[in-house]
Amino acid sequence: MNRTTLANAQVGDVCLVTEIAQKPVELRSRLYALGVIPGASIQILRVAPLGDPMQIKVGATLLSMRKTDARIINVQIQ
């Protein structure tokens, strides 16, 4: 099991959120509202041809996220 940030995860990876950085506060609040919280399971579905953004699945929700935003999310790849 690897510990890294969500930005480094590959298509098909299933990740467990371990921590979300304190700042930026607005982004952290938005992620929490979308269900991206410590303990949540995230699946990487696809990445755009140029590498950004990435589509993820959190529970039953599909989200598109920029790699710069994904860098504040620490995960453990399962």
Image (spheres, helix red, strand yellow):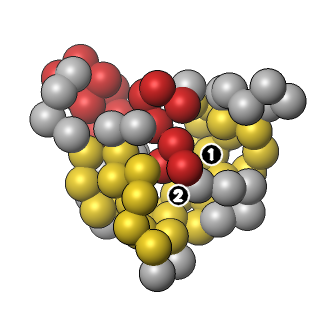
Q: Residue at x 62, y 45 (%)?
A: 56
Q: Secondary structure at mark 1?
A: strand
- Classify residue 12 by image quadrant: bottom right
Q: Residue at x 30, y 23 (%)?
A: 27
Separation of disc 1 and disc 2 at Cα? 7 Å
Q: Estimate the x, y position of residue 42 in percent, counting from the top left.
A: 53, 58
Q: Amino acid at mark 1?
A: Ile
Q: Amino acid at mark 2?
A: Ile
Residue 19 visible? The answer is yes
Dot 1, crowdedness within 10 Å: few (<14), some or many (≥20)?
Answer: many
Q: Residue at x 52, y 77 (%)?
A: 78
- Classify residue 47 by image quadrant: top right
Q: Estimate the x, y position of residue 17 in percent, counting from the top left.
A: 36, 59
**Image check: 45 left or right of 17?**
right
In the depicted structure, whether residue 16 falls above or below residue 74? below
Residue 57 visible? The answer is no
**What numbered label is drawn on residue 19?**
none
**Image check: 20 left or right of 40?**
left
Tell me whether circle 1 and circle 2 mark residues in contact (CB < 8 Å).
yes
**Image check: 28 left or right of 62?**
left
Dot 2, crowdedness within 10 Å: few (<14), some or many (≥20)?
Answer: many
Q: Secondary structure at mark 2?
A: strand
Task: Please report whichever mark, 1 or 2, sits nearer to the chain's N-terminal start.
Answer: 2
Q: Residue furthest bottom?
A: 1
**What numbered label is drawn on residue 42?**
2
* Viewer-side residue, 8 vs 22: 8
Q: Residue at x 68, y 39 (%)?
A: 55
In the depicted structure, whether residue 27 falls above or below residue 7? above
* Viewer-side residue, 57 vs 50: 50
The residue at which mark 1 appears reads as 56
